[in-house]
Image (tube, coloured by chain):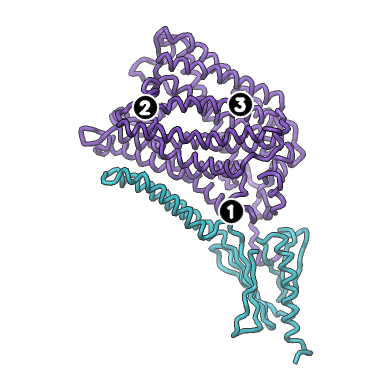
Amino acid sequence: MPYRWLPPDPATPRQMHLQLWAHHSLTRTGFVGFVGATAALALVPMLALLGQMVLWVIMAFFGAAIWAIWAAITRNIRDRSYAEDLILTPEQAHLIHRRGTAASREWRANTHWVSVAVYPKGGPVEDYLTLRGAGREVELGSFLTPDERRALRDDLLRHLADLRGAVSPAAP
Amino acid sequence: MADAAMHGHDHDHRDFFTRWFMSTNHKDIGILYLFTGGIVGLISVIFTVYMRMELMHPGVQYMCMEGMRAPGGNGQTGAGLGWVLYPPLSTTEAGYAADLALFAVHLSGASSILGAINIITTFLNMRAPGMTIHKVPLFAWSIFVTAWLILLSLPVLAGAITMLITDRNFGTTFFAPAGGGDPILYQHILWFFGHPEVYIIVLPAFGIISQVISTFSKKPIFGYLPMVYAMVAIGVLGFVVWAHHMYTTGMSLSQQAYFMTATMVIAVPTGIKIFSWIATMWGGSIEFKTPMLWAFGFLFLFTVGGVTGIVLSQAAVDRAYHDTYYVVAHFHYVMSLGAVFGIFAGIYFWIGKMSGRQYPEWAGKLHFWAMFLGSNLTFFPQHFLGRQGMPRRYIDYPEAFAYWNWFSSLGAFISFASFVFFIGVVFYTLFAGRRVTENNYWNEYADTLEWTLPSPPPEHTFEQLPKPSDWDHSHAH
């Protein structure tokens, strides 16, 4: 699933950090493999032109084509780099949205008053997941699949309950 | 809803100009490609019919003799150089026409490369969750391999025609023997592009045929992985056989032997595909709808064209057949009766999905039979003409070749009539065709993602990611 709860940092044991990211079907290894294989195969016919002026003419166009596919995939990865970080402490919920090359957006609210809402229908996506607090409602994980959002909601409710229990008056 | 959301779907309704002349919607751009290709295809078919009118009888009837401005061949590029642009004619032809033609080829090549980059990026980086490489539909795979071939072969063409431009205008002598150059060097570079180009033409048809045959046999495609890697193998092997277009240029016998052997090897993955398509139909419940007729036609006729390709691959045999009508017959069988039949299969398969209206079945079948008759009548006799020794790219011929040329021209007129009829079918379908109400108007074996959508699909296609259950069916890929 493209979300994970990071292991707690010993320096901040009561902080929970959720990371979410959009699905990319091309892995880094696959990207390197594809561009590398394409470039390597493109160089094979260049062997026949070694020592000739023609080599430079053809290489210029090949180089441009290989650069262009590398640039297009890199740009696509960057533009589709949707990521969200939710940092929960007993006192504060802090959400950061990163959307490609756009400036990141942030939301903070008191953890105690944060509520989790799911809209099965009527939202931009199925099982639209939002957090409410500090007078605002913000979305979470809109780029996940509906199944992933449902699972995330259950996780969030459990973790919020843990954090609120940690500052309950009944706690020692 | 949520103020941190980034849903940019709030653009206003677009007017006609914005939608069709400034589109960023892949479906609309695809339709633009189809219509542009159709219009340009119609123009080129009209030129073709004009050539067949000239060639119907011996003697020069219609074409201008002065300066031999219009010898045979449909790829004149407006400058009388043939589509291959061989020097020394292309480097010595006076006037601007050749330079403009070279610029046009540059523009077209750059456009193809950009489109290929788009396809490759989408195929690699934007698949739905769970759709691993080995679960991608075969049509998408065929387009991916095609795009990869474009990416690697078009820059070589760009290099070749750049050198033509510099030889013409800037005093270089890449291809001029007087300056130490070699016109055969151009041929090597050109055909290094030219042979992958023919696989660029036919590979998408392979993908379409796979989708159509599995749908109308009501069976999953036989051997998904071998089909994928056969296409990859055809693509890779297509880069190492170019000089089978140059057997008569004076290459050494070792070179000819190598290219002959390599060319024959391509028949292996191609044969895997043909047998897999047949195996797909074997034991299936075959429905002879129009797309399936085109697919059947493709299977048989592409095979006929393929076997004449094996004949031509033999250097000793090609010594006689090179630049004769036998070659013309071969490549028209694989292209006009192969790739074009594949295109028509795809159009009839997907026109309901694209437009929301379905074609009249009787009209589709009539188009098929007219085109089948016409195109076979056009190109089969050309095998005989080639064997009799009739050269390519001539506007006139001796009386001895008159008989089969007459039949060939008759076939061309029937094919043209079928194409005009097809244009009528398309416009009738788009404006008055029966509206399609189901998402999947074929059957459950049409199981790729487009069949989960309404016809036509909504503007953003998928507002949310498709789930694996939408496309990962147990019986087919």
Q: Is residue B450 above or below residue A133?
A: above
Give the colour chain B carries in the figure: purple
In the rendered image of the structure, the colour used to display chain A is cyan
Question: Comparing marks 1 and 2, which lies closer to the viewer?
Answer: 1
Q: Secondary structure at mark 1?
A: loop
Rounded to the nearest whole Å, what is the CA distance between mark 1 and mark 2? Answer: 42 Å
Q: CA distance from mark 3 to mark 2?
A: 33 Å
Label 1 vs label 3, nearer the camera = 3
In this view, the residue in front, B65 or B221, is B221
Residue annotated with mark 2: B81
Cα distance between the residues tagged 1 and 3: 34 Å
Residue B433 position within the rendered picture, expressed as x and y whole percent measured from the top left: 72, 30
How many marks do you count on the picture?
3
Question: Do the numbered discs 3 and 2 sit on residues whose CB atoms are within 8 Å?
Answer: no
Mark 3 element type: helix
- Residue B77 percent coordinates (x, y): 41, 29
Disc on the earlier residue, 3 or 2: 2
Residue B234 versus residue A134 in the image, above or below: above
Q: Eyeballing the image, is A67 above or below A108?
A: above
For disc 3, the marked residue is B297
Question: Upstream in the sequence, badge 1 or badge 2?
Answer: 2
Q: In this rendering, do the residues under marks 1 and 3 share a single chain?
A: yes
**Where is residue B121 drawn, in percent x and y?**
53, 51
Residue B18 visible in this rendered orientation of the protein: no
Q: Earlier in the sequence, mark 1 or mark 3?
A: 1
Q: Amino acid at mark 3?
A: Gly
Query: For the C terminus of chain B, which image quadrant?
Result: top right
Residue at mark 1: B126
Q: Amino acid at mark 1?
A: Met
Tag 2, which secondary structure? loop
Residue positioned 45% across, 15% down in the render: B385
The 10 Å Cα crowd at callout 3, few under 14, some 14 to 19, many 20 or more, is many
